[in-house]
Image: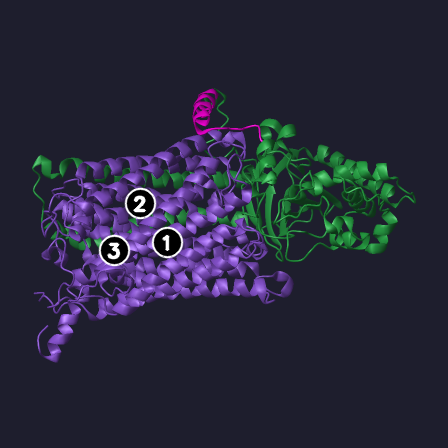
């Protein structure tokens, strides 16, 4: 249970006993009221269609509230007046009255009227939500769900962003609502999201955009949005995707078109620099690879295999002292590049040679594995 | 025993075995009904314990009690145990006890099959519990972290406990289908002379429809999970896009079962209400015929709207429009049922014993749950609600009042008939109020959580969701513990109490109230004549 123990230690809310919990909760509850960050309704929409969805939500809620009040009104009237203790005599022929004989027509017709009102309004909004605009200058973002991170491909700009949750130490109050790399999007331009998954089902959900769509392996589904204000909008994965479903936040950073263009240029420059570094004909030292490898491992691998290398058996094997990691380099490279079918181990072949070399070197030497092996980018190239 | 062979048979029928033989070999509808109800009660506490653990974990942000896979495993088991272990067997228990007594039949039509359909259940429950426990043993594989919907590809990743679960579902399905066949045959063939289908008690009608629904949809679930089993072990790719399959196909198969299942859980309780409300309003059920019509309509439309559970999978505009309108239309027959209940109470002479209190709570709270269902049916708005805590709040508001409170009402209503003792009315009322208030504190705040953006089935959440989770968990503790009172009341009533008359309630109507309380081991050996 050491993995569980570690999980518990990671949290700042350590509650030792039930009674202590009760006291703490009472205290926190009243302390938190003043901050009043909790919401009771959708956050303010950041897109026109999202606003229409918000409006239809409010409309149906109002209609249903009125219906509820009508039902409650009749029931409570009856509960008060038609009771034996008040001496009320039961009307044994109520069901034989005109009303009794025709209510089976009257009631459904009235309900149908309400239904058609709701369905009619909903239908108009639905068409806007479902029909993705066909425009030349639409921005295509491919959203791929992974266990447990999001990959955003800006297809028009050839940029890829990997977005992962940030541990509580660094994210503080935004824990589980903050990521390392945000999904940066411009305002005033139609954006088409293309959803798919690399492993199991996920769902992309950002409440301010009112966009939710499942990520299904083998499918590409689409949704769209046009942001009408700048800001930071936070959502989470909405479809149960295994162990760390709770650790898949989505953070959209909505910026002006100019800022977006600048951001795109930055990302391209970073990408060029990384590619140059990886392809440089250089022999890397163990220390260099270990330093690079630790950063990469902690972001990309540690969700399953843990920072400690202990894993979370039986689902996620530990790497400390494992036969795979201390055995032949070829097998180790192969499982990293190609993944292992039927398990949560996914192929990492999309990383560049240097990154894979660094991760493999790190895994072979960290946590007292100390094999002394140094895997060079050229070895990775050969293994591909 | 008398001398003729004819009388030999009769003497055999009056034989009442004792000890474990009485229960294991039982072919008596009353004993099998009791077994079903006891089984359901045990499962209610197991499923309830898992729900309490879930709420304790969500009491505060952070991961305190349960590691994420154990949390997901509990979420899965809570749903399956409550649906297949508690609610369905409890409804079957009421059916076994009451249907023969209500229609003037000596027993169920197929008594030995009745025995089989019950005794499959303990085996199925053992498999179900094993599926939860196995991962804790060395080599037991990973825990079931999929939720009760078992969506692939996640469910293909799970270890051997998923296989235990698949076989548990097969067994539960066989049990349900056998029980349904028995109920249909009994209702169609064993009614007392003079009792037509359209004068049959409403509880029998609801079970007739429920039984047909079960026979139609349970095999689809069995097929779906069998395909899953083949994908897991025999190299097929029904649900694997890489092999030419389709992960969404499983969702369609699952919800083709899963949506009618909601009505399977709901209808028997509607049947109970149709007896409780007239009894305590002291006037006949309003709109018997429209009730039957509404029920058949619900069952029919309910069979063809399953994909409203899957609005986010990327169906075509035409498909979602169809499923949206179909789903919204369900409000017509359901609205008519609620209307009929209110009209039954209207101008009655009501008293408020525990069964009636539950009945009134159902009318109010089920209406609430149904109306949030209309909100969920609206596709564009569902883009926000889907898979959020709003959905959790909604279906608990439908299933707790709609199914479980109905069963509670039935148990309190018929407990005097079964045991021959009146239950303690004061305790019954205390149970009602703690239960209903606890329930509302638990689930009402979850609407807000969902709207504010909290997804369901997460083990850990951001502190912006703390307040309502704290309230919800406090409610859950009240709600959960209140069931201990139910247990106490039931045990106390079985052991003794004020003697119940044959007609235990002033306004109770129907053949079951003509019999002694408790009824003889064999009743209606001579069919009553219905005029």
Q: Is residue B194 above or below residue B206?
A: below
Q: Nearer the viewer, mark 3 or mark 1?
A: 3
As measured in the structure, the alpha-carbon distance from the residue carrying label 2 to the one carrying label 3 is 23 Å
- The chain carrying label 1 is B
Q: Which chain is green?
A: A
Q: In x, y percent, where is residue A340?
A: 69, 56
As drawn, the residue found furthest toward the bottom would be B5
Position of residue B493 measured from the top left corner of the image (x, y, whole percent)? 19, 45
Mark 3 or mark 1: name the one nearer the start of the chain: 3
- Residue B85, labelled with which disc? 1
What is the tally of numbered marks visible in this picture?
A: 3
Return the residue nearer the eye: A254 or B204.
Answer: B204
Give the extent of the magenta segment: A11-31
Going from the N terminus, do you reach mark 1 or mark 2 first?
1
Quarter of the image where the C terminus of chain B is located = bottom left
User: Gap between marks 1 and 2, in whole Å?
Assistant: 18 Å
Residue B238 appears in view = no
**Badge 2: chain ID:** B
Q: For the stretch drawn in magenta, what is the main secondary structure?
A: helix
Q: Earlier in the sequence, mark 2 or mark 3?
A: 3
Residue A67 circle label: none
Left or right of B85? Residue B6 is left
Image coords of residue B416 (percent x, y): 16, 49
Q: Which residue is mark 2?
A: B401
Foreground label between 1 and 2 = 1
Q: Position of residue A5 (x, y in %)?
A: 58, 36
Check the image and report above or below for A14 versus A299: above
Which chain does purple denote in the image?
A: B
Residue nearest the observer in this picture, B143 or B350: B143
What residue sits right under mark 3 in the picture?
A: B34
Q: Is residue B342 rendered to the left or right of residue A121? A: left
Magenta segment: does it hold A57? no
């Amino acid at each position: 249970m050491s993995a569980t123990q570690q999980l518990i230690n990671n949290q700042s809310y350590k509650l030792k006993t039930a009674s202590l919990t009760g006291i703490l909760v009472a205290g926190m509850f009243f302390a938190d009221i003043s901050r009043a960050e909790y919401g009771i309704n959708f956050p303010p929409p950041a897109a026109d269609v999202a606003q229409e969805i918000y409006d239809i939500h409010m409309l149906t809620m109002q209609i249903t509230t009125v219906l509820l009040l009508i039902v409650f009104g009749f029931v409570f009237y009856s509960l008060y007046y038609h009771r034996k203790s008040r001496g009320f005599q039961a009307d044994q022929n109520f069901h034989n009255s005109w009303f009794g004989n025709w209510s089976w027509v009257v009631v459904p017709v009235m309900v149908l009227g309400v239904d058609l009102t709701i369905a009619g309004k909903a239908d108009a909004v639905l068409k806007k939500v479902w029909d993705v605009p066909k425009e030349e200058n639409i921005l295509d973002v491919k959203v791929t769900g992974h266990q447990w991170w999001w990959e955003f491909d800006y297809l028009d700009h050839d940029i890829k962003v990997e977005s992962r949750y940030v541990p509580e130490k660094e994210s503080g109050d935004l824990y589980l609502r903050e990521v390392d790399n945000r999904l940066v999007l411009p305002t005033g331009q139609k954006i088409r999201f293309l959803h798919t998954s690399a492993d199991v089902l996920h769902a992309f959900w950002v409440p301010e955009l009112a966009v939710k769509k499942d990520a299904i392996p083998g499918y590409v589904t689409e949704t769209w949005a046009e942001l009408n204000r700048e800001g930071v909008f936070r959502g989470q994965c909405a479809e149960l995707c295994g162990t760390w479903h709770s650790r898949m936040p989505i953070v959209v950073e909505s910026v002006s078109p100019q800022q977006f263009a600048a951001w795109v240029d930055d990302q391209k420059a970073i990408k060029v620099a990384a590619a140059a570094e990886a392809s440089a004909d250089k022999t890397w030292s163990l220390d260099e690879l270990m330093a690079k490898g630790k950063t990469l491992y902690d972001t990309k691998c540690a969700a399953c295999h843990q920072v400690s290398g202990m894993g979370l058996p039986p689902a996620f094997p530990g790497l400390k002292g494992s036969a795979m990691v201390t055995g032949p380099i070829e097998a180790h490279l192969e499982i990293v590049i190609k993944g292992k079918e039927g398990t949560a181990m996914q192929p990492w072949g999309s990383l560049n040679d240097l990154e894979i070399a660094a991760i493999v070197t790190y895994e072979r030497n960290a946590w007292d594995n100390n094999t002394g092996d140094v895997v060079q980018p050229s070895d990775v190239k050969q293994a591909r | 025993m008398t001398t003729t062979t004819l009388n030999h048979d009769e003497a055999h029928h009056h034989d009442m075995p004792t000890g474990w033989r009485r229960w294991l070999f039982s072919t008596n509808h009353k004993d099998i009904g009791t077994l079903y109800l006891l089984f359901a009660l045990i499962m209610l506490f197991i499923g309830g314990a898992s729900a309490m653990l879930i709420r304790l974990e969500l009491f505060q942000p952070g991961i305190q009690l349960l590691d994420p896979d154990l949390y997901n495993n509990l979420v899965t088991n809570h749903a399956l145990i409550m649906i297949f272990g508690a609610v369905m067997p409890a409804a079957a228990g009421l059916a076994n006890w009451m249907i023969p007594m209500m229609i003037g039949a000596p027993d169920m039509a197929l008594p030995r099959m009745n025995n089989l359909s019950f005794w499959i259940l303990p085996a199925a429950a053992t498999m179900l519990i094993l599926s939860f426990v196995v991962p804790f043993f060395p080599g037991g594989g990973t825990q079931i972290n999929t939720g009760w919907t078992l969506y692939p590809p996640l469910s293909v990743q799970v270890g051997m406990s998923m296989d235990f679960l698949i076989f548990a579902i097969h067994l539960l399905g066989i049990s349900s289908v056998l029980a349904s066949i028995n109920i249909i045959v009994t209702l169609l063939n064993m009614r007392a002379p003079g009792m037509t289908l359209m004068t049959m008690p409403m509880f029998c009608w609801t079970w007739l429809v429920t039984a047909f629904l079960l026979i139609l949809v349970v095999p689809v679930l069995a097929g779906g999970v069998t395909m899953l089993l083949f994908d897991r072990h025999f190299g097929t790719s029904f649900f694997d896009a890489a092999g030419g399959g389709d992960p969404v196909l499983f969702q369609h198969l699952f919800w083709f079962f899963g949506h009618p299942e909601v009505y399977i859980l709901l209808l028997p309780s509607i049947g109970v209400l149709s007896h409780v409300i007239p009894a305590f309003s002291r006037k006949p059920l309003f709109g018997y015929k429209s009730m039957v019509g509404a029920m058949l309509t619900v069952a029919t439309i309910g069979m063809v709207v399953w994909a409203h559970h899957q609005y986010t999978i990327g169906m075509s505009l035409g498909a979602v429009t169809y499923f949206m309108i179909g789903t919204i239309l369900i409000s017509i027959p359901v609205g008519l049922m609620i209307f009929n209940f209110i009209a039954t109470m209207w101008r009655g002479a009501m008293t408020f014993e525990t069964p009636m209190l539950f009945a009134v709570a159902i009318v109010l709270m089920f209406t609430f749950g149904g109306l949030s269902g209309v909100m969920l049916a609206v596709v564009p708005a569902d883009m926000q609600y889907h898979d959020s805590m709003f959905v959790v709040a909604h279906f608990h508001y439908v299933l707790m009042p709609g199914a479980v409170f109905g069963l509670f009402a039935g148990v309190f209503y018929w407990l005097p008939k079964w045991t021959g003792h009146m239950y303690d009315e004061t305790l019954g009322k205390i149970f009602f109020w703690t239960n209903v208030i606890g329930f509302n504190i638990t689930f009402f705040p979850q609407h807000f959580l969902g709207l504010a953006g909290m997804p369901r089935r997460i083990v850990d959440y951001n502190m912006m969701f703390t307040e309502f989770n704290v309230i919800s968990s406090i409610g859950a503790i009240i709600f959960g513990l209140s069931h201990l009172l139910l247990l106490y009341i039931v045990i106390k009533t079985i052991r003794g109490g004020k003697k119940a008359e044959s007609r235990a309630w002033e306004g109770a109507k129907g053949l079951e109230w003509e019999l002694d309380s408790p009824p003889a081991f064999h009743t209606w050996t001579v069919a009553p004549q219905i005029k």
